[in-house]
């Protein structure tokens, strides 16, 4: 299973955004990233 929090610890947010665009055709990753930015 894809562990988003673990991924976030190891990868910069901009890299996650690039990863999301590359591997996902839905916006949940982008929305999740926005939420994590607000929390963090």
Image: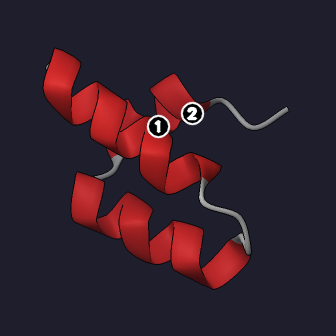
Depth check: 7 or 27 in front? 27
Pointers 1 and 2 in contact (C-beta within 8 Å) = yes
Please name the residue that numbered disc 2 is placed on: 4
The answer to which of marks 1 and 2 sits earlier in the sequence is 2
Residue 25, horizontal then vertical, whole percent: 74, 75
Callout 2: helix, strand or loop?
helix
Look at mark 1 in the image and give the residue it sits on. Answer: 32
Quarter of the image for the C terminus: give it: top left
Task: Please name whichever residue, 15 or 35, is drawn nearer the observer in this view of the structure.
Answer: 35
**Label 2: few (<14), some or many (≥20) within 10 Å?**
few
Q: Residue at x 47, y 37 (%)?
A: 32
Q: CA distance from mark 1 to mark 2?
A: 9 Å
Of badges 1 and 2, nearer the viewer stands 1
Left or right? Give the position of 4 relative to 32: right
Residue 18 at x, y = what percent?
Answer: 42, 76
Image quadrant occupied by the N terminus: top right
At horizontal 57% and vertical 33% (from top left) the residue drawn is 4
Coordinates of residue 22 in the picture (x, y in percent): 61, 83
Q: Residues within 10 Å of mark 1 (few under 14, many from 20)?
A: few
């Amino acid at each position: 299973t894809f562990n988003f929090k673990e991924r976030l610890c190891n990868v910069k947010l901009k890299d996650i955004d690039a990863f999301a665009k590359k591997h996902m055709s839905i916006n949940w990753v982008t929305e999740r990233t926005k939420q994590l930015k607000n929390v963090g």
